[in-house]
Image (cartoon, rainbow, N blue to C red):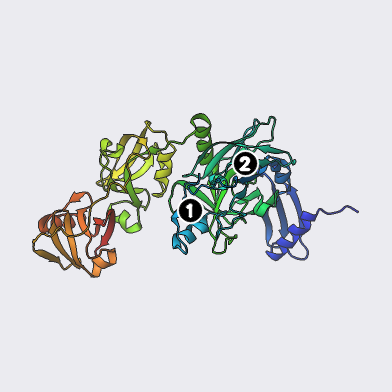
Amino acid sequence: MRRTPKWMFTATAVALLLGGCDKGSSWFGREDDNQGFVKTIETDGKNGSVAMLLPDFTQLVEQEGAAVVNIQASRDAGSRNQADPAGMDQSQFPDNDPFYEFFKRLVPNMPSEPQDAEENFNFGSGFIISADGYILTNTHVLAGMNNIKVLLNDKREYSAKLVGSDAQSDVALLKIDAQDLPTVKVGNPKQLKVGEWVAAIGAPFGFDNSVTAGIVSAKGRSLPNENYTPFIQTDVAINPGNSGGPLFNLRGQVVGINSQIYSRSGGFMGISFAIPIDVAMNVAEQLKTTGKVQRGRLGVVIQEVSYDLAKSFGLEKASGALVSQVIAGGPAAKAGLQVGDIVQSVNGEEVKNSSDLPVMVGITAPGKEITLGIWRNGKSESVKVTLDSMGSDTAANNPAGSAAPDGSSAAGFQVPSLGLGLQQSQNGLVVINSQGLAAQAGLRRGDVIVAVGQTSVSDEDSFNKAVAAAGKNIPLLVKRGSNTLFLALTLQ
C-alpha cells in the first residue's frame, strides 16, 4: 500500500479546519518549484476547489543553512572601552535611567545589569556573502570587542578581521581567511509583501543552526534614531544570538539581517526587525572599498503628510515628505527648495511616506545630483539638487529659533472664527490663547505662526489675507521651541 507523505496529512487537517472539504471530498498535493519552497494544496469539495499555500522550510535549511555562521566576540581582560563600535556609550546611562531601558528593548545583546564575567563576551550570527570569506553581521554584536571568532556550519573555526562597521545602519563586515565557501543568494526586499512567509537561521542564546519562521508584519518601519533604515517588521522569533543572522524568503534568498527586537522582558515578544539586504549590501560595498560609509545629505527637516495637511495643500492623497525647515547653506537651500514644498519623488521613485526620503537620499553618494519631484503652490515641479555628505550641518545644530515672545509691546489681536489670540513679535505671530478650531489643530500658547502655507505672515492684515486665500483647509507653519512644523487648521 502506498504511504501518504506526512505533509499531506497536515494539509488535510488544515483543509478540514478551514471548511475547504467535506466527508466525500477528494484532494491532492503537489510541490510547485516556481513558487520556491512552498506546498500547494488543492481540495475539491461541494463548495468547489480551494487552494492553499503552506511553507516548507526543510529544503531551504538544507540548501542555505551552510552559509550561516555563528559569531563569538570577546574582549581581552582590562581592555574594556566604554565607547563601543555600535556608537552607544553605555557610561552615559546612570542607574535606573529610563533611556537605558528604552535602548535595552531595541538591542538584544544589551545586558540588563553589569555582569563581570559576561560583559567581555558577545555572541551572534552572520552569513557568508562571498566565497573568499566576507561575512555580514550586526555592529552591536561586535560592540567593544577585539577578538572575533567565526564558527562555520561544518564546525570549522576561523579568526575574523573586522573590515569595517557602520553604527547608523548596524551593519558590520568581517573577513576570514578561507576559500570556496558556501554563500547566500541575495534577494530583493522591495518585492517582499506583507503577509509573506519568511524564516530566520541563527544561534539564539548560542544554540547554533536554529530555525524560526513567521510572516512579514510590515515594511518600511522607522525606529527612533534610525532614519536611514526602512526596517522589515516580522513576527519571526528572534532572540539574543540571532542578531546579524539572515532573514530568508521562500525562494531561499536573503532579504534582511535580523537586527532588533522590541521586548519588555529581554526575550522575543512577537515583534522583530530586520535590515533590508539592499541597504546592508550598499553599506558592505562601501566598507570593503573605502572602509567607511558616506551618505548623501539634502539639508531639510521634514514631517509626515497627514490627511488634513494633504487637503490643506491641495493634494488628493496623503503621501510624500513635507519640508518644514530648510537648513541654511545646505544643498536644498542652494537648489531653491522651500519650506512648504512636498517631496513626492526622488529620481522618479515615489516617496510614499516621509520616512522614505532619508533612505532614498542616504543611499546616494555625496556629490551626486538627484531630481526631486515636488508639490508647490498647487502644482507639480522638478528641482535638481546636488547632495553633500552627512555630518556637516544638521537640524539639531541649526535651531529654528525660539518660540517665546521677543518682549515687544505690540498689542495683540483676536481671530474669533479660528479661536486664536495672536501678538506680533520679531519672529512671527505668537499664540496668546488657543481654543476651538485652533486647539483642535494642535496650536498651543507660545507657538509662533510664521507662515500660512508658503506665505509669510507678520501682522494682523497679512495673516487675515493669507487665511482668506487658503480656503477651508489652512496649513500653518509653526515654530515650537527649536522645531518647525506644519499644522492643519480646518474650518467647519
From the viewer's perspective, is 256 left or right of 88? Answer: right
Mark 1 lies on a secondary structure that is helix
465 above or below 148?
below
The quadrant of the rendering that contains the C terminus is bottom left
Q: Residue at x 65, y 37 (%)?
A: 159
Measured as percent of width and height from the top left, residue 405 is found at: 17, 60
Indicate the amino acid at tag 2.
Ile
Q: Residues within 10 Å of mark 1 (few under 14, many from 20)?
A: few
User: Which of marks 1 and 2 precedes in the sequence?
Assistant: 1
From the viewer's perspective, is 264 left or right of 380? Answer: right
Residue beneath label 2, please? 148
Residue 476 visible, this angle: no
Q: Residues within 10 Å of mark 2 (few under 14, many from 20)?
A: many
Report which quarter residue 328 is drawn in: top left
Report which quarter residue 46 is drawn in: bottom right
Measured as percent of width and height from the top left, residue 222 is found at: 45, 52
397 above or below 405?
above
285 above or below 24?
above
Give the farthest residue toward the right: 1
From the viewer's perspective, is 144 left or right of 126? Answer: left
Nearer to the camera, 483 or 8 = 483
Indicate the amino acid at tag 1.
Gln
Measured as percent of width and height from the top left, residue 456 is found at: 17, 50
Measured as percent of width and height from the top left, residue 166 is found at: 49, 41
The reply to whether discs 2 and 1 touch (Cβ–Cβ < 8 Å) is: no
Report which quarter residue 98 is drawn in: bottom left
Residue beneath label 1, please? 90
Mark 2 lies on a secondary structure that is strand
The quadrant of the rendering that contains the N terminus is bottom right
